Image (cartoon, rainbow, N blue to C red):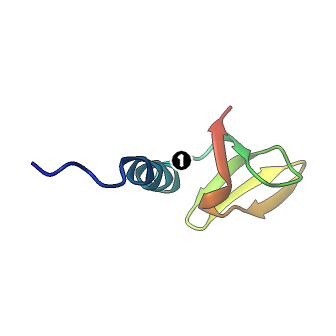
Amino acid sequence: MVPVANADWRDQVRAYHRDRNRKVEIGQKVGIKGSTIPWVVITSTRPLTGEYGGRRYRVPRRMLGDVL
């Protein structure tokens, strides 16, 4: 077999897609990356929205962090 040319890059791509396509459930408290709000409680999955401090926000999947 031929060795993999860019194993590190492939691992990063797989991790990116794993994080982006993960399933979230209504009611989960999820951290937000790269935002002024620290977390949201998921209220809808399509479109992906969440509430924080009484306000509802639309959340891009790339900003989803860890489940709290």
Give the residue at the far left of this rendering: 1
Q: Quadrant of the C terminus?
A: top right
**Residue nearest the viewer, comparing 52 with 14:** 14
Residue at image point 14% right, 52% down? 2
Residue at image point 64% right, 51% down? 64
Residue 9 drawn at (x, y percent)? 44, 54
Badge 1: residue crowd in 10 Å (few <14, some 14–19, many ≥20): some
**Residue nearest the viewer, comparing 9 with 3:** 3
**Residue nearest the viewer, comparing 15 with 33:** 15
Residue 27 drawn at (x, y percent)? 64, 42
Residue for badge 1: 24
Residue 24 drawn at (x, y percent)? 53, 47
Q: Height in image: 33 above or below 68?
A: below
Residue at image point 89% right, 53% down? 36
Residue at image point 30% right, 55% down? 5
Residue 6 drawn at (x, y percent)? 36, 54
Q: Secondary structure at mark 1?
A: loop
Please state if 25 lies on the left or on the right of 60 as rendered: left
